[in-house]
Image (spheres, rainbow, N blue to C red):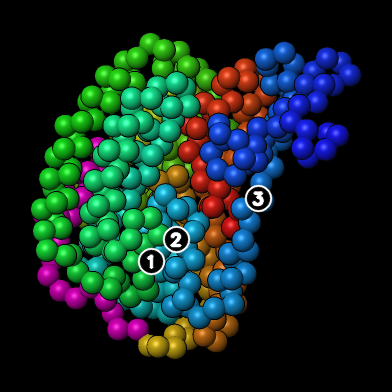
Amino acid sequence: MKGEGERIQIEADGGMTVNLGPQHPSTHGVLRLMVQLDGEYVRSCDPVIGYLHRGLERMFESRPYRQLVPFTDRLDYLASLNCNLAMSQAIERLGSVAVPERAQYIRVILCELNRLASHLVFLGTFAQDVGATTVFLYAFREREKILDLLEAMTGARLTYNWIRPGGVPADFPDGFAEGVRAFLSDLLAELPHYTNLLTNNPIFRMRTEGVGVISREQAVAFGASGPVARGSGLDFDIRKTQPYEVYDRVRFDVPSCPEGDCFARYRVRMEEMSQSARIIEQCLSDIPAGDTMTKMPKVFKPPVGDAYSRTESPRGELSVYMRSNGTPMPARVHVRGPSFVHLSMLPCLLRGVKLADVIAILGSLDTVLGEVDR
């Protein structure tokens, strides 16, 4: 490349190098894709990350345990509650903190609502990536209803800082459970309409079927998880294989598709929305009375040791490793984000595809760069 400001370079053999990003309207987040083209086909792709790097892991290690959760909101900012939970569980396991049963049910309800909100963002933006605008408007209409509910609960609409070590700071506000039930009824009535708009749309299927195929073997080799792995036929969900909170008390299915293409990953997320609604309904029916928070000391000093928290975020396995040296601050914190793993698949995934398919494939991975550049 001749310089950062030059977007396109003509190679000696007639090929072309194109920069998609780091700030480009067709990329998801602050990501740079250096794409080498032969005509309209991709020879190679080199993803360049780091434009959003904030050194979050070192920030975790320089603050007391109870001050760590607000930073997790800035990891996967489309699923902040899921990030809150992963960090809180690591701290709780490190200090052997018991969480009240009612708080565990509330955590699951909030995380599944956040999963629905995240998948609706995927649905709208992925449809727009391949040229369908109407679904974007419908998906964000439904997401707005979830954000209203979460705002009533937490006071925030994006960065919640609500699931904390020991439980949650407050119980449901008046009318929250009724509002969630009303929303789920509306959502389940609308999902078939989205199916008619996209799943049965021949143009959408032409743009997604057989495009960006990830084989089952590739998914295993790269360590893929979440909808990306399940879209390649892997029946793997941490909520089932290593259940946490009260996931072992609710009934739900783990959708998977063997095709491994963009359309399969879309279908998995569509079905996951129905399963999340099913989980929430069961939790609302079974939630017991009781406290929502275990009393935590102002200065929390867990014993020397380490802990590992594995959770299923909307994008896949979000895990936190934490090590204590007996002081009020952790000695080491590492976050395992699924988006980082999935972006590493792009060089082999994009080789030989058309340039028009690059954005569709990237959109089907549903990455969040805050989780990558941590």
Q: Residue at x 63, y 63 (%)?
A: 55
Give the mark nearer the N terminus: 3 vs 2: 3
Local SS, label 2: loop
- Residues 16 and 268: in front is 16
* Residue 161, numbered label: 1
Q: Position of residue 94 (x, y in %)?
A: 46, 76
Q: Is residue 265 visible?
A: no
Q: CA distance from mark 1 to mark 2?
A: 7 Å
Residue 148 in the figure: left or right of residue 68: left
- Give the vertical position of 191 relative to 163 (above or below): above
- Give the vertical position of 228 relative to 316 (above or below): above
Residue 369 in the figure: left or right of residue 268: right
- Residues 284 and 247: in front is 284
Residue under numbered circle 2:
73
Q: Mark 3–mark 1 contact, CB under 8 Å?
A: no
The image quadrant that residue 361 belongs to is top right
Local SS, label 1: loop
Highlighted range, magenta: 273-296
Q: Residues within 10 Å of mark 3 (few under 14, many from 20)?
A: some
Q: Amino acid at mark 2?
A: Asp
Give the mark nearer the N terminus: 3 vs 1: 3
Q: Residues within 10 Å of mark 1 (few under 14, many from 20)?
A: many
The image quadrant that residue 323 belongs to is bottom right
Residue farthest toward the right in the current orientation of the protein: 12
The quadrant in which the C terminus is found is bottom right
Q: Mark 1–mark 2 contact, CB under 8 Å?
A: yes
Residue 369 in the figure: left or right of residue 89: right
Give the mark nearer the N terminus: 1 vs 2: 2
- Give the vertical position of 124 relative to 318 (above or below): above
Q: CA distance from mark 3 to mark 2?
A: 18 Å
Residue under numbered circle 3:
51
